Amino acid sequence: MLDAKIPAGPIAEKWDNHKFSIKLVNPNNKRRFTVLVVGTGLAGASAAASMAELGYNVEAFTFHDSPRRAHSIAAQGGINAAKNYRNDGDSIFRLFYDTVKGGDYRSREANVYRLSQVSANIIDQCAAQGVPFAREYGGLLANRSFGGAQVSRTFYARGQTGQQLLLGAYQALAGQVAAGKVTVHNNCDVLDIVVKDGEACGLVIRDLMTGETRAYSGHAVVLATGGYSNVYYLSTNAMNCNVTAAWRAHRRGAAFANPCYTQIHPTCIPASDDFQSKLTLMSESLRNDGRIWVPRDAKDTRSPELVDEADRYYYLEEKYPAFGNLVPRDVASRNAKTVVDKGMGVGPSRNGVYLDFSDVIAADGEQVVREKYGNLFDMYERITGENPYRVPMRIYPATHYTMGGLWVDYNLMTTIPGLYAIGECNFSDHGANRLGASALMQGLADGYFVLPYTIGDYLAEKLGDPVVPTDDPAFTESVTAVEDRTRRWLTVKGSLTVDHYHRELGKIIWEYCGMTRNRAGLEKALNEIPVLREEFRANVKVLGSADTANQSLEKVNRVDDFMELAELKVRDALHREESCGGHFREEHQTEEGEAQRDDGNFAYVAAWQWQNPDKPQKLLAEPLEFEYVKLTQRSYK
Amino acid sequence: MTADRVPPLHKVKKALPWPLSLYQTAIGKKYVMAITGIGLLGFVIVHMIGNLHLYEGPSQVNEYAESLRDLGGHLVPRTLILWIMRIGLMLMFVFHIHSAYSLKEMSRKSSENAGFMSGAKRYASKQDFVAASYASRTMRWTGPIVGLYVLFHLADLTWGWWLGDGYIRGDVYNNVVMSLSSLPVMLIYIVANIALAVHIYHGAWSMFQTLGVTNPHTKKLRRSFAVIVASLVCAGNLSFPIMVQAGVISNDSNNTNSVNTSEHSTADIDADNA
Amino acid sequence: MSRMLQLKLRIWRQGGPASRGSFLDVDAHDIPTDASFLEMLDIVNERLLEDGIEPVVFAHDCREGICGTCGLMINGRAHGPELGTATCQLHMRKFKDGDEIVIEPFRAAAFPVVRDLMVDRRAFDRIIEAGGYISAPTGTAPDANEILIPKDVADFSMDAAQCIGCGACVAACPNSAAQLFTAAKLGHLNVLPQGQPERWRRTEAMVETMEQYFGSCTNHGECHTACPKEISLDFIALLNRDYIKAKTKNRRLASQA
C-alpha cells in the first residue's frame, strides 16, 4: 500500500501546517545542492526558476531548441483561480469542490485543496511577471466562465493564455540563467534516470544535435515532462511530446498511476487522411453557439445546407434537453463516437459530425459571429479549405490530456526517493477527468508554489553529501545501456518506418482504449500490442548514424516506450471495472448511458509497479477518502 | 549559462566616453544616419529652391550666390558663416557615409552569402524579398552614386576643373548653362538626381522609424511626406538640365522670367554654387 | 475533397554545421492538397526512407502555429507565401500542380545549420537572458488587481507578446537583423507598469546583446511581412526610441518617463 503522506488536520490547514512542519534548508546551504529539472514547460520552467531564486543550483533539460517551445504554449483557453473578482460566489472551497467533482471523485482531496489555495497566488505571480492578461477598461483583470463552470473564474490572454504563461515562466528562467543559478541544456533527450541505493541521483541524455550521450548528477531529479497523449499517434499534442523520461523512471522503480484516464476533447478537426500527422483543437467555446448534428439517414449524402430541418439529427439536444450542446466534454465526445460508429458520420471520410452556425448567423448576423469566433473560423478555413460561415464545420473528438502519470505523494515525490514529478507528468490533481482551464493552473501551482517548498524536506537530510560522481558504476551502467539501446536500432535494418508502427499502435489503442472501452476489446488489444511491439523491434527501419542529428532515431526510442506504456494503459483499463471520467467502460453505464462508478470497489488510485520486462507490473493501490466532498452520480439530463 | 555553440559574431569594443559610446552601437549609428540625413535632406531642399533663381535670370541667381557669401552681414568676416556651414555639411557627409558603411559591414558579417556592396543576404530562390521596396534595397547603391555625383558636381561648378576659360568664378548662371549644355553632363545629372530621389524616398520615411516615431495617427503622413519630398526634389533638380537643353535657360534668352521676387533669399547654405 | 499535386522540390541538404550543403531534387508525386506543408515533407521523407535515403531533417513540433519550432524558406519567403501563417499552418492547396518549390533553411550567421533544414536559434535565448524579463521572484507579488493596466495598454503589450520566436524575421531580413524579435519582447514589457523599473536597463542590455549576433536594421519591412503573428514595425521604432533614452537618461530620476 502506498503512503501519500497527507498531513493531518482540517483540510484548510493541511498545507500551512505541512509547510511549517517539513524540514527547511538554510539559505546559505541551498547553494550546496544541485537539482536536475527535466522539461521546461509551465511546471518545469516555473519550478527551475523558483528553486534557483531560493538558491539551489538548477540544471534544466529540454529536448527543444529553446525552453519556450514546450507544449504548454499551445493551451488556448485560460487559467482558473479562486479570486472571486466577479463577486459571483467563487471561493477556494468551490474551486476545490468543482475540481474533485469534475474529476469524478478519483483525485486526492488534500492535493486538490492545496491547488485551489495557491491558484490565487499564481495569478498574482504571473501578473507581476508581466503576463498581459485581458483587462477591463478600468484596468482590472477580466474573467470569463469556461468549460461549463457556474462562476467566472478563468483568466485569459486572448486565445493564447498558455503561450503567455509559458513565456512568463521562461522569462523567469532566463533571469535565473543570467544570474548564473540555472544552466539550460537545450536539445537534450533524457533517456534514463540514474538510481543509486534506491535514490534518484542523476540522468542520462542524448544530445539531439551531436548524438553524444552524457550523464548529469544531482541531489534530486524533477520530471516535468508532460503527458503522453501521443501514444494514440493522432492527438492534439505536439509531435515531440512523449512519455520517455517518465517511462524510464517507471522502469527504474517509480510507480505509474491511472494510465487509463485519458481526456478526449470533443471539438477537434477530423483527420482528413492517412498522412495526417496531428489533430488541431478548436476552442470548446464554439459549442456555446454552434449546433451539433448529423443527417438522420446514414445514406443521406446531400450537402449539409440542403438537408431539411426534419432530416437533421441534433442528437445532443434531443438526448440532453437541459444542457443540449453544452454537455461535458466526455459526454459530447462519446455521443459523437456513437453516431459515427453507426455510419452516420459526415465528411469525405465520414469521420465527423457537423457543428453548424447557420442559426446563430441568421439570428445575430455574420459580423457578431466574426467578432466572437473570427480567429477560430479563420484557423478552420486555413486547415480544411472550407468556409465555416457558409458550410457547417466538421468536428470529431481527439485525445487531448492524460490525467494519469507518475504516482506522487503529497510532496510530489514519486516512489523513488529524490525523484519528483510535477505538472501533467504526475497523476495527482485531476482524478479521472480534468476541468477546462485547470491544466495551466496545476502546472504552475506545482512549479511555483509546491515543489520549491517540499523538495527541501528531502534535501535537508542530504546536507553535506556530494553528488554521486558520473563515473560511478550506477552512471556508467546507465550510459552503456542508453548507448546500446540507441545503436541497436541502427542494426535492425528492417523494412518499415517508425511512423508506420506508431500509426499502427495508435489505431489499436484508439479503437480499444479510446473514448469507450469494453472487456473484449481491451483483451484483444492486450494480445495485439505485444505482437506489434515485437514486430516493431525486429523490423523497424532506421537509417543514418547515432553521431549526428537523426530524427528517426529520436522517434524510435519514444515509440518503443509508447509500445510498453500502451500495454499498461490497456491493462489498467481492463482492471478498472467501472466507468469514471475519462474512462468509460461500456459494461458499466447507467440506464441513461452515463458513466457508472463503483465507489465501493474502485475508489482508489491504481499505481503500477514495474517488475521486469517479462513480468507484468504489480498493482499498488492508494485508497481515496472523501471527507469534504460528498460522492454523487453525475447527470446532465 | 548554456554551453555556447554559437559565439557572438561581433566583438564588444571597449566603451568610449559618452556620447561617443553611442556611436559605437548600431542603433547609435542609425541615429547619426537619421540626423545627418535630415541635415543633408534640408540642404538638398534648400539648394533646389535656391537654384530656382535660375529661372529669374543671371543677375538674380548670381546675386543670390553672392548673398550666401555675405551671410551674417557686416557682423562677421565675409564668408565665415558660409564656411561654417560648409564644414558642417562635410561632417554630415562623413558621418552619414561612415555609419552607413560600418552598418553595412555588420550586416554583411551577420548574413551568409551576402553581396559585398549591398551587404544583403541572398537565397537560392528567384525572389527572396517581398516587402522591401526598390528604394530600400538599393540604398547602398544610390548612396555611393550620389556621393560620386557630389564630387563631380563640385569639380564641375565649384572648382571649374574642365570648363576651362569658359568658367567664370561668381557667374553661376553662365557656368550652369555651359556645363549642362553638354549632353553627357546632362545625362550624369539626370541619373544622379533620380538616384538621389530614390535614396530620399526611403530615407525620408526610414528616419521616422529610426528616431522612434510610433504615433499611429501619423503613420500615413510619414509615407506621404517621403513621397512628396522625393518628388519635389526630383522634379526641381531635373528641371535644370532639361530646361538648359530645351533652351529655356540659356545665355541668349536672359531674363525670360525676370520678375524680381526677392532681393534677399532666405538663409541658404548653398555650397556648390558659391 | 483532396486533389493530388505533382511537385518538383529542391530541398537543401547539409550533413552538419561544418559541411557544405547542396540541393536535392525530388519529384513529389501525388501530394494531397489537404496536407499541410510539413505533412507533405513527412510524405516525402517516408518515401525517401523506403528508398533507403536518410530523411530530410527539419524542425517542427506543435503544428498549430504557436510553438515557433518550424520555419522554412519556401520559394524565398520565410514560412512561405501566406501572410501571417507559420510553415506548419501552410497547406498544399495554396500550391498549383506542377509547381517547383525551393526549400531552404532560415539563414543568418547567428543561426548555423544543424542539419539539412534545421538551424540553431539559441542566439535568441541570449537576447532574452540579457534582460527580457521582469524580476519578480516567486511569492513576492502583490494582488494582481493592485496593478491597474488600461485595456489599450494591455492590448498593445499583447500585440507584441504574441511573438513566437520562430526567427522568420531574421531569416527574411536581408541584413539578418533581429530587430523585430527584440522589439517584440521590449514592446511587451516596456509598456507595462510592471516593466518600468527595469525598462532602461533591459532595453540597453537586450539591444546590445542583439547587436553581438545580428545585423543592422535598414527598415526594409521584410520582417513584418514574414512574421506569422504580423507584429508591427512600430515596435522597432519603440525600440529605437527607448534605446537612445536608455543611453542618455539619468536613471536615478525615476520621474522622467
Image (tube, coloured by chain):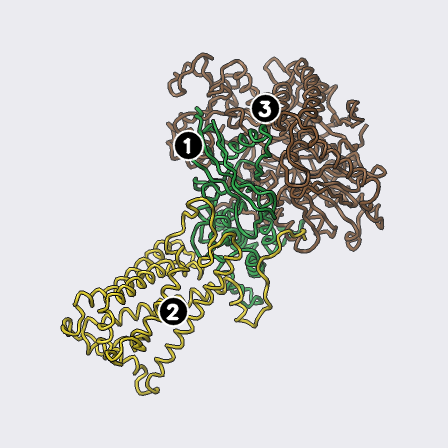
Chain colours: A brown, B yellow, C green
Q: Is residue A138 visible?
A: no
- Residue named by callout 1: C98
The span from disc 1 to disc 3 (Cα, nearest Å) is: 45 Å
Q: Is residue C112 found left or right of A105 in the rendered image?
A: left
**Residue A628 placement (x, y as % from top left):** 71, 30
Secondary structure state at the residue bearing disc 2:
helix
Work out whether A596 lies above or below B47. above
The span from disc 2 to disc 3 (Cα, nearest Å) is: 69 Å
The numbered disc on residue B39 is: 2
A422 or A457: nearer the viewer: A422
Q: Are marks 1 and 2 on the same chain?
A: no
Q: Residue B142 is drawn in which quadrant? A: bottom left
Label 2 crowd bin: few (<14), some (14–19), many (20+), radius 10 Å: some
Label 2 is found on which chain of the structure?
B
Q: Can residue A222 be seen in this view?
A: yes
Secondary structure state at the residue bearing disc 1:
loop
Q: Do labels 2 and 3 share a chain?
A: no
**Residue A281 placement (x, y as % from top left):** 53, 31
Secondary structure state at the residue bearing disc 3:
helix
Instruction: Name the mark nearer the viewer: 1 or 3.
Output: 1
**Residue B230 placement (x, y as % from top left):** 31, 60
The numbered disc on residue A330 is: 3
Residue positioned 32% across, 57% down in the render: B227
Residue positioned 69% across, 33% down in the render: A244
What kind of residue is marked 2? Gly
Instruction: Name the mark nearer the viewer: 2 or 3.
Output: 2
What kind of residue is marked 3? Asp
